[in-house]
Amino acid sequence: MADALYFAPWIAGAALAGTLAALAWIDWRTGYLPDRLTLPLLAAGLLYMGWSAGLAGFADGLLGAGVGYGAFVALEKSYKALRGVDGLGRGDAKLLAAGGAWCGWAALPLIVLTASLLGLGFVGASAALRRRGVASTQAIAFGPHIAAAILAVWITTQSAVYGRIYP
């Protein structure tokens, strides 16, 4: 039994990384983050937080999921009201909710900052490669950047909690 407990974070990390990779690929190709992957990822994050940190961890993940989802829905609706066009999809909000479930509410600003910096870097590199000096109005998928940020923050969080990446 002890061996199974030792490997649980490895298994959780592999499931998280694999699901995030699949979501990033799907969003990159289609511009869509399917509920059939985002919602189970959110539930798995809550289960992992409850398993690894007890009731306090579960509550932290639940608050993270709610705050992450609510913040991105508010941003989505505000942008639509100001600009009259969609700027963020509901799938992005569900993916951030999953990130909040896996990493806790306090990690949300770091996830959003990291994802935003990755997205800006991508846009800058794309513009430089196209050698155009004007900003493109073409939409980019934000999901791959959120996914990468979630994984990076989760690994960092595990390292901070356990003193190394995994126990």
Image (tube, rainbow, N blue to C red):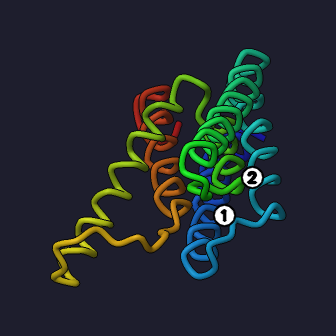
**In the depicted structure, whether residue 54 falls above or below residue 166:** above
Residue 90 location (% of width, % of height): 71, 53
Residue 103 location (% of width, % of height): 58, 34
Q: Is residue 35 left or right of residue 132?
A: right
Q: Nearer the viewer, residue 106 or 44?
A: 106
Q: Quadrant of the N terminus?
A: top right
Q: Is residue 6 visible?
A: no
Residue 65 location (% of width, % of height): 71, 34
In space, the residues marked 1 and 2 are separated at their CA atoms by 7 Å
Q: In what element is the residue under mark 2?
A: helix
What residue would you read off at disc 1? Answer: 19
Q: Is residue 14 left or right of residue 142?
A: right
Task: Name which residue lies at 41% across and 36% down.
Answer: 164
Q: Nearer the viewer, residue 131 or 27?
A: 131
Q: Which mark is residue 41?
A: 2
Q: Is residue 100 visible?
A: yes
Q: Nearer the viewer, residue 113 or 89?
A: 89
Q: In what element is the residue under mark 1?
A: helix
